[in-house]
Image (cartoon, grey):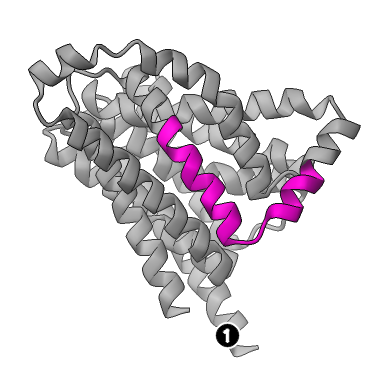
Amino acid sequence: MIKGILFSVTASVLFGIVYFLSTVLQPIEGTQLFGVRTLVTVPFVLFAMVLLHKKQEFIAYLKRLKEQPYLLALVAFGGLNMGSQMWLFLYAPVSGKAIEVSMGYLLMPLVMVLFGRLFFRERLTTIKLLAILFALIGVLSKVILTGAFSWETAFVCVGYPVYFAVRKHFNMLHISAFAMEMLAMVPVSLYFTCQIDFSFAEMQNPNIYWGLFLLGLVGGSAFILYVTASQMLSINLLGLLGYLEPLMMLLVAFIIGERLDQTSYILMACLFVAISLLILDGVVRVKARLLY
């Protein structure tokens, strides 16, 4: 269990480093970085499947796709959704939107809880209901004060829950489905990668190749560590540790010079209260499981 916790924490730190790396890979743009990151991540995903002995699961999934070809539309949807999220992850830090995307990742667990209740009839504890209430107050305060809500925040906090809800409904919550989605993104990723003028990029940034190497190595290692941790830890404990990643992203946003505007103070305070309540709920569940 200690090893699983260490793997999960390390993965979150590494994902935070990936968030920062996009700021030092100029003049390569976010869309082009997305292409590179996808191409270098695919081998790590396939390696993870070998590491976790998922060959038979992958073959069975391919057979299912052949027998139910309509699922290919879901593979395309999943690839588009995941690809868009990966693009936004790299685009945000170089576009002054790192805080907005970090907020989306902080809101996402709460929206996931709400989706679980609405679409899968999952039971909500009193603590989770309070967490959702605080998050709602925060979001409403942002809308009232600004008359709008950041599309970057909304895209993350709603996009991921929709993605996971669809996969759960069709029984596709496994690494084989994710691998197929990544493979589906390869042609588009190749196109964006081919748009990079590497000669010009090297003239502007002599360390560009080392940066791209680190992007692949750090991102791929983070993925392997997280997948491995998910096999060692309970869902509740893994979820608790997962809150470290958006906090790392927020830290990166502050490091690169972004600051909270006054209209976001109430939202951020409510989010931290809500996340604290979810963590409390998770700790209670983990303790109860350990006792029994």
- Identify the residue at the far bottom of this view: 291
Question: Which residue appears at 33% of the width and 25% of the height?
Answer: 33
Question: Which residue appears at 25% of the width and 29% of the height?
Answer: 93
Residue under label 1? 290
Residue 184 locus on image (x, y percent): 61, 26
> Residue 1: in sight, yes or no?
yes
Residue 190 locus on image (x, y percent): 45, 19
Label 1 neighbourhood size at 10 Å, few (<14), some (14-19), many (20+)? few
What secondary structure is marked by label 1? helix
Name the residue nearer the viewer: 242 or 15: 15
Residue 78 locus on image (x, y percent): 63, 30
Is 247 in the magenta? no
Question: Which residue appears at 54% of the width and 32% of the height?
Answer: 158
> Residue 164: in sight, yes or no?
no
Which SS does the magenta portion mostly show? Answer: helix
**Relative height, residue 278 to residue 237 (above, below):** above
Number of residue marks: 1
Question: Which residue appears at 70% of the width and 53% of the height?
Answer: 55
Instruction: Kindly identify the amino acid type of the residue bearing the numbered disc 1.
Output: Leu
Residue 147 locus on image (x, y percent): 37, 16
Name the residue nearer the viewer: 211 or 263: 211
Place residue 51 in its image quadrant. Answer: bottom right
Name the residue nearer the viewer: 99 or 46: 46
**Relative height, residue 49 to residue 211 (above, below):** below
Name the residue nearer the viewer: 27 or 161: 27
Which residues are the magenta region? 39-61
Q: Is residue 261 left or right of residue 62?
A: left
Place residue 31 in its image quadrant. Answer: top left
Place residue 179 in its image quadrant. Answer: top right
- Identify the residue at the far right of this view: 67
